[in-house]
Amino acid sequence: MNTFKKKTFPLLTLLSAILLLSACGQTSGSGAASASGAAAGTAASASAKPAPQFDLKDLNGNDVKLADFKGQKVYIKYWASWCSICLAGMEELNTLAGQDNDFKVISIVAPNFKGEKSEADFKKWFASMDEKNTTVLLDPDGKYAQQFGVRAYPTSFYIDSQGGLSKTVPGHNTNDVIAANFKDIP
């Protein structure tokens, strides 16, 4: 192997690994661990920590609180308009939100946080999308994203019927995986 290849091969290998692991991720400014206390795939348990009790507005300005869903399971997907993986999964999320499930489907975007558009620009951009079933809540400046411990987009949070954060999964989850995860969550 010539000298150039010997020097660049390890660098290319390292860069490839970083790209694969980061997806659409950005590290949290606070350096917080995920709200579940583990990095990924936290299993559902009777001792699930309480989920952050958000109080946000939807795209129409209506107040939505996690407490509004007391007694129900809730799937929360944090995503960003600039995240290609998030955008590739939007049609699937819209389908899931339109189905009759035993859980509520909510998506949250954080305007002016981690490179997301301003609230006004996001609303204008999203209005051009054909996502009629998807509930989008706005988390200005990422206040609750930080409490949830969002480190990468997309990230899924599985809330049990008691309001506990049962599972945190960074990356894309298919609808089948989401439904299967909720089978193990009370």
Image (cartoon, helix red, strand yellow):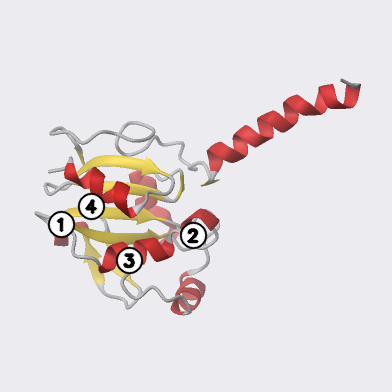
Between marks 1 and 2, how big is the CA–CA gap?
Answer: 24 Å
Q: Residues within 10 Å of mark 3 (few under 14, many from 20)?
A: some
Q: Which of the labelled discs sits on residue 88, or is there none? A: 2
The x and y percentages for residue 186 are 12, 43
Counting residues from the start of the chain, the first of labels 4 and 2 encountered is 4
Q: Amino acid at mark 2?
A: Ala
Between marks 4 and 3, how big is the CA–CA gap?
Answer: 26 Å
Q: Nearer the viewer, residue 74 or 13?
A: 13
Element at label 1: loop
Label 1 sits on residue: 102
Residue beneath the point at 44% across and 45% down: 171
Residue 38 figure quarter:
top left
Discs 4/2, front: 2
Counting residues from the start of the chain, the first of labels 4 and 3 encountered is 4
The x and y percentages for residue 32 are 41, 36
Label 4 sits on residue: 53
Q: Amino acid at mark 1?
A: Asp
Residue 149 figure quarter:
top left
Q: Which of the labelled discs sits on residue 163, or is there none? A: none
Element at label 2: helix
Q: Residues within 10 Å of mark 2 (few under 14, many from 20)?
A: few
Label 3 sits on residue: 95
Q: Quick check: marks 2 and 3 in contact, CB under 8 Å?
A: no
Q: Is residue 149 left or right of residue 85?
A: left
Residue beneath the point at 44% across and 51% down: 154
Q: Amino acid at mark 3?
A: Thr
Q: Residue furthest left?
A: 71
Q: Is residue 81 left or right of residue 55?
A: right
